Image (cartoon, rainbow, N blue to C red):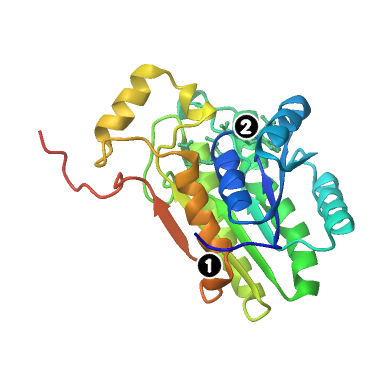
Amino acid sequence: MFNLAGKIAFISGGTKGIGMGIARVLKQAGAVTIIAGTDELRGETIAKELEVDFIPLDVTDQAACKNVIAQIVEKYGRLDILCSNAGIFPQHYLKDMTAEDWDLVHTVNLKGTFFLVQAALNVMEKQHYGRVVITSSITGEITGIQGYSHYGASKAGQLGFMRSAALEYAGQGITINAVMPGMIMTEGLKSFGDEFLSYAKDITPMRALGSPEDIGYAACFLASDEAKYITGQTIVVDGGQVLPEVQEA
Ligand code: NAP
């Protein structure tokens, strides 16, 4: 396990699912961990359970993103690690998709990433140190799913954003990377229903869904000092889901 003792880590969408798994792992690795989400009641409850701090944040609000990063610096003195993880995945088939459906997904997933990462980088630049880990997806960059063209575009968009951002900050002690989860058992995925979960298991070569902590371990590596020479890169964590060229009967 990589040692994050003394590091200050902030995780958007850390109150559920993958973000909660990342928070658990970073905390276990020794980081002072702060989680955020829009649901304050849930955030406070989960923070107590994980023994981490909670700050309410809607990542679609640029001023709030700046304000939360400023609050963290004021309270903890610095920000070493940002995990930009908050995201939504409502299903809308293209034939019925409205501009509002499209905008909501892009505003939370892509614009929210821009707002939060930009605010964190402004602090990390002054420190000459920072680790940014974005939760993207295999969807969009590698795979597609019916009903998720807006989502896939937002997740591939995060990777395009990451690559240029990584270049802008290379040489300043700051790395910007992404994890690309496959099917991870979270509250969000559970909402697809049991039939889908069972199907998802069957089509995954490892015959299991991932756990939020599986993503946490990859994020922990990218957030570590040992990953200092890696930037603008991705780690796929998917139980082999993207590998098969054909499905064996
Ligand atoms: P989830 O269980 O629904 O959790 C989503 C988290 O994001 C919650 O903490 C939620 O908190 C927060 N959130 C949503 N909208 C927000 C906003 N506007 N501002 C701040 N926080 C917000 O979802 P998940 O499955 O863990 O997914 C987390 C990330 O992983 C997403 O970016 C998703 O695209 C990605 N991902 C998931 C999978 C998977 O299989 N689960 C696969 C690939 C990628 P509140 O409810 O309090 O706002």
Label 2 element class? helix
Check mark 2 vs ligand 1: CB closer than 8 Å? yes or no.
no
Residue extending furthest toward the right: 74
For residue 125, side relative to residue 16 (left or right): right
Label 1 element class? loop
Residue 247 place in picture, x, y as percent: 16, 39
Q: Is residue 55 visible?
A: yes
For residue 80, side relative to residue 214 (left or right): right
Can you say whether 232 is above or below 192 in the image? below
- Answer few, some or many: residues within 10 Å of disc 2's Cα (few below 14, many 20 plus, some between 14 and 19): few
**What residue is rendered at 65% in x and 36% in y?**
103
Front tag of 2 and 1: 1
**What residue is rendered at 84% in x and 45% in y?**
64
Read off the residue under disc 2.
Answer: 99
Query: Who comes first in sequence, dot 2 or dot 1?
Result: 2
- Residue 222 bears which disc, if any? none
Q: Is residue 137 visible?
A: no
- Answer few, some or many: residues within 10 Å of disc 1's Cα (few below 14, many 20 plus, some between 14 and 19): many
Residue extending furthest toward the top: 194
